[in-house]
Amino acid sequence: HAKAAGKNTYAIFGSHMAELLRRRSALEHDLRAAIKNREQIEVFYQPVYAAVGAELCALEALVRWNHPTFGYISPQEFIPIAEETGLIHEIGTTVLDDSCSVLFELPHITVSINASALEMQSPAYPLRILTALSEWQVKPERLEIELTESVAAGDSVQLELNIKMLRSAGVKIAIDDFGTGYSSFSRVQKFAVDRLKIDKSFVDDLDRGDSNATIAAIITMAQRKGLKVTAEGVETAEQQELLRDLGCDHLQGFLLSRPLTRGDMMALLKVRAGATA
Ligand code: C2E
Ligand code: MG
Ligand code: MG
Ligand code: MG
């Protein structure tokens, strides 16, 4: 019996693997065309709110691939493909341009973009960012670049140089998914950044009371260094209240808003502006 079940498991696993591989090579093939004709690559915006007072302060740009047959594909699936095929730079530029146009249209808001390790280590990256900002007449201080901890912990001279150049021009740098990497606390000292984004896994653990001390320690360290703290993935009112009480500056998560199309995001901002006018 066990043997038969085992065999079946392998058969199912095998066909599932084959299907994944087929999908992967289809995506690899289709991504180049998708970037060329532009329409399939969309930028969504997730609002970020002040922890106290709940003012909408910022937007995080999150890329989406609206594939003609597979539908919306998560960046977690296609960013690695874009990195392997070198298409990541084009995707990054699309997100950058869209974000700059939002910054131009909404003068009271800041926008963050996610940079891949490959972009952040490219010698052309800082100038690409600063050129886009100046073409849109946007102050560099209004753009924040999010780097995952593993990128920030990298040992590349170019990476450090790029961060220094961008920061000295006024662009903000944030460490994304903070707390999940091997680098954590000690490596943040390596170069100055402006913000830590506490990973969703710590926010989830708040429900069991497991991560309160860790979050408190992150916030204490951040405050000592003059860094802002955002908590990501806030899904419940209990988490919102705890994070506010722990001293987080900003909150982001499905409880407050999902990532929105540009149209929905603009509509939300109009409603809010109307409500306070
Ligand atoms: P991230 O930068 O940490 O973004 C947060 C992710 O969590 C987003 O997923 C967002 O939709 C999701 N999220 C936000 N609030 C909640 C919540 O309350 N609950 C849950 N379950 N999820 C929440 P998304 O958009 O699928 O992006 C995944 C990752 O892909 C991002 O993680 C980022 O690392 C990467 N990514 C997204 N856009 C870009 C991009 O333009 N360039 C690059 N290089 N990477 C990107
Ligand atoms: Mg991010
Ligand atoms: Mg994150
Ligand atoms: Mg993430």
Image: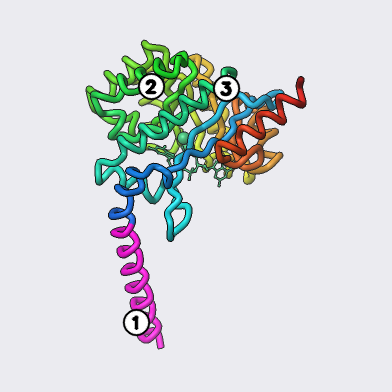
| Residue at position x 25%, y 45% in the image | 85
Q: Is residue 185 left or right of residue 155?
A: right
Which is nearer the eye, 238 or 40? 40
What is the magenta range? 1-26
* Label 3 element class: loop
**Residue for badge 1:** 7
Give the CA distance from mark 2 to mark 3. Answer: 16 Å
Q: Is residue 244 magenta?
A: no
Q: Is residue 237 left or right of residue 264?
A: right
Q: Amino acid at mark 3?
A: Leu
Question: Is the Cβ of the residue at disc 1 closer than 8 Å to that at disc 2?
Answer: no
- Label 1 Cα neighbours within 10 Å, binned few <14 / some 14-19 / many ≥20: few
Q: Is mark 1 within 8 Å of ligand 1?
A: no
**Residue for badge 2:** 132
N-terminal of the pair, mark 2 or mark 3, is: 3
Image location (x, y in percent) of residue 189: 37, 20
| Residue at position x 32%, y 43% in the image | 36
N-terminal of the pair, mark 3 or mark 1, is: 1
Q: Amino acid at mark 1?
A: Lys
Give the CA distance from mark 1 to mark 2. Answer: 56 Å
Mark linked to residue 106: 3
